[in-house]
């Protein structure tokens, strides 16, 4: 009986992983397909990657995505770190609601609410038109909660007696934070920053609502391409974006595995 259960568990695991990763493998495989259509495999080629790196619209969109990801992840990391520390130290009922709500609500709802907010602000003061700035502000808003979760998990594994010892030796609260707390939670901060960058560079729904007509990012450009046809060039850029995302996730897990698991 135990052997049958084990066999069923293994079979279910195999089917689950096939369901998750087989489509991704097909996307990568067909990015090397020597055909303008994805109907059948014709032969191996690298031409689609060459054309991709000569596509000015795609390069511009990629540049926008990198700028947005770097700026948004930087500010989200700063505010998210402060929020994570506050969540750990202060047991206020309203604080988790304020910090974690952007994670819990659907992206569609958040995108609609943000675009309404930006339109109202622009009507009042006239300096916040939809574009790269509104995308960055939106990404900061929804990334703060993710960084806060990682930092709070790191804080929970910290020995508070280290801070108390530093204070007993004459350190001010800021010195104790800079010399003791910050180095201990730094792996969690780095992991949170990488996670924020990954979420920002991959985001489509919120970006779609807050981009406006003049700004384009990599996910938006991919969407505009697949409305015509899913060519191997689309597969190529999707494969590179997937590779970047997986690399950042692996780096984050190596930098702070305990923070990502929520353990010590």
Image (spheres, rainbow, N blue to C red):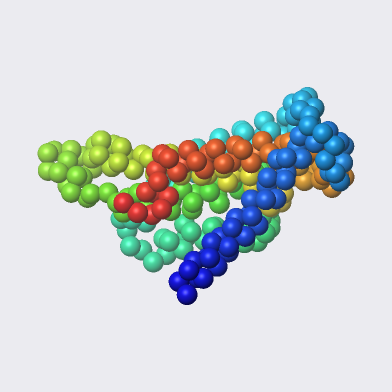
Q: Residue at x 22, y 50 (%)?
A: 160
Instruction: Note whether residue 264 is visible.
Output: yes
For residue 3, above or below residue 182: below
Of 52 and 74, the residue lying toward us: 52
What is the count of numbered marks? 0
Q: Residue at x 86, y 46 (%)?
A: 39
Of 63 and 75, the residue lying toward us: 63
Q: Position of residue 249 (x, y in %)?
A: 52, 43
Asked if residue 116 lies left or right of residue 224, the reply is left
Of 41 and 129, the residue lying toward us: 41
Q: Residue at x 47, y 75 (%)?
A: 1
Q: Position of residue 214 (x, y in %)?
A: 77, 38
Q: Farthest left residue?
A: 169
Q: Position of residue 67 (x, y in %)?
A: 61, 33
Instruction: Note whether residue 83 is visible.
Output: no
Q: Farthest bottom residue?
A: 1
Name which quarter of the figure residue 237 lies in.
top right
Of 211 and 239, the residue lying toward us: 239
Q: Residue at x 48, y 68 (%)?
A: 3
Q: Position of residue 77 (x, y in %)?
A: 46, 42
């Amino acid at each position: 009986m135990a052997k049958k259960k084990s066999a069923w568990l293994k079979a279910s695991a195999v089917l689950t992983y096939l369901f998750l990763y087989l489509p991704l493998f097909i996307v990568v495989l067909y990015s090397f397909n020597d055909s303008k259509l994805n109907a059948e495999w014709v032969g191996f080629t690298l031409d689609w990657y060459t054309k991709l790196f000569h596509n000015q619209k795609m390069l511009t969109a990629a540049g926008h995505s990198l700028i947005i990801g770097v700026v948004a992840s930087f500010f989200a990391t700063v505010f998210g770190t402060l929020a994570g520390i506050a969540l750990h130290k202060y047991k206020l009922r309203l604080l988790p609601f304020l910090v974690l709500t952007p994670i819990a609500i659907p992206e569609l709802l958040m995108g609609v609410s943000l675009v309404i907010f930006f339109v109202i602000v622009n009507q009042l003061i006239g300096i916040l038109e939809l574009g790269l700035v509104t995308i960055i502000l939106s990404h900061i808003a929804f990334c703060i909660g993710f960084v806060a979760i990682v930092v709070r998990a790191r804080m929970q594994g910290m020995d508070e007696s280290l801070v108390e010892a530093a204070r007993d030796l004459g350190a001010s609260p800021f010195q104790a934070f800079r010399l003791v707390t910050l180095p201990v939670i730094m792996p969690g901060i780095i992991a949170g920053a990488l996670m924020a960058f990954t979420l920002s560079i991959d985001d489509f729904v919120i970006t779609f609502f807050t981009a406006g007509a003049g700004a384009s990012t990599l996910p938006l450009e991919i969407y505009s391409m697949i409305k015509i046809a899913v060519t191997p060039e689309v597969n190529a850029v999707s494969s590179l974006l997937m590779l970047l995302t997986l690399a950042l996730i692996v780096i984050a897990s190596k930098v702070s595995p305990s923070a990502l698991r929520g353990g010590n």
